[in-house]
Image: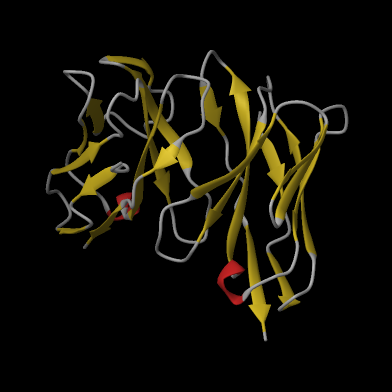
Amino acid sequence: GQNIDQPTEMTATEGAIVQINCTYQTSGFNGLFWYQQHAGEAPTFLSYNVLDGLEEKGRFSSFLSRSKGYSYLLLKELQMKDSASYLCAPGGDTGFQKLVFGTGTRLLVSP
Amino acid sequence: GAGVSQSPRYKVAKRGQDVALRCDPISGHVSLFWYQQALGQGPEFLTYFQNEAQLDKSGLPSDRFFAERPEGSVSTLKIQRTQQEDSAVYLCASSEDRGETQYFGPGTRLLVL
């Protein structure tokens, strides 16, 4: 079966750093995606990790440990527009990226 | 270039009515996915197409749900005899190939009364 665990909600202030954790158990694994979703909008791609380690992309970084079934998304220099849900999605090893999404972490950035 | 587009953006249906939701993927994208997203939840996989072939439909909740992509581009998700529990946002995503990043459309918000 598939099991993805993320905190439901987090709050932070503008300019701060926040780390959103994700643990997963999946049958087969082919990399892990992070998506951002603003209320009422489509998920937008943030990052993809297939190897262990840290991938940095501007203000956002993503880390993966395959042996621990663990990933995190690190957001630096938070801005108000970063208030959104952040979805962790491991891809399945089924010959295509069969994404299994968690319920997402709703991040609220306050002034 | 244009992203994934979906229509209609909003659909209100009476219980028992049939609905058809359309997805236009990014031009040239081989893979196309449908997801269902209930309020406060993450998207849940429904079905996957590679070109015109439907290779995985394991997420379709019942035989009332049917998807097609006859020419390998535009796809339609059809729901027959809609029920209230079908109310959700239906997201379409496409990718260049089967292992690549998926790009999502804006979704169709379906409300069944």
Classify A91 as above or below A20.
above
Question: Quadrant where the C terminus of chain A lies?
Answer: bottom right
Classify A59 as above or below B31.
below
Residue at 69%, 28% in the rendered image: A26
Residue at 34%, 25% in the rendered image: B29
Q: Residue furthest right?
A: A68
Classify A13 as above or below B79.
below
Residue at 24%, 46% in the rendered image: B6
**Residue B59, x across and y down, in percent:** 43, 30
- Most foreground residue, A86 or A26: A86
Q: Residue furthest bottom?
A: A111
Classify B80 as above or below A97.
below
- Asked whether, in this view, residue A43 is left or right of residue B78, the answer is right
Answer with the quarter of the image where residue B25 lies.
Answer: top left
- Asked whether, in this view, residue B20 is left or right of residue B6, the answer is left
**Residue B82, x across and y down, in percent:** 21, 47
Residue at 71%, 27% in the rendered image: A50
Instruction: Count numbered badges in the picture.
Output: 0
**Residue A6, x across and y down, in percent:** 72, 53
Image coloring type: secondary structure
Question: Quadrant where the N terminus of chain A lies?
Answer: top right
Answer with the quarter of the image where residue B66 lies.
Answer: top left
Answer with the quarter of the image where residue A75 lies.
Answer: bottom right
**Residue B30, x across and y down, in percent:** 35, 20
- Most foreground residue, A41 or A69: A41
- Most foreground residue, A73 or A99: A73
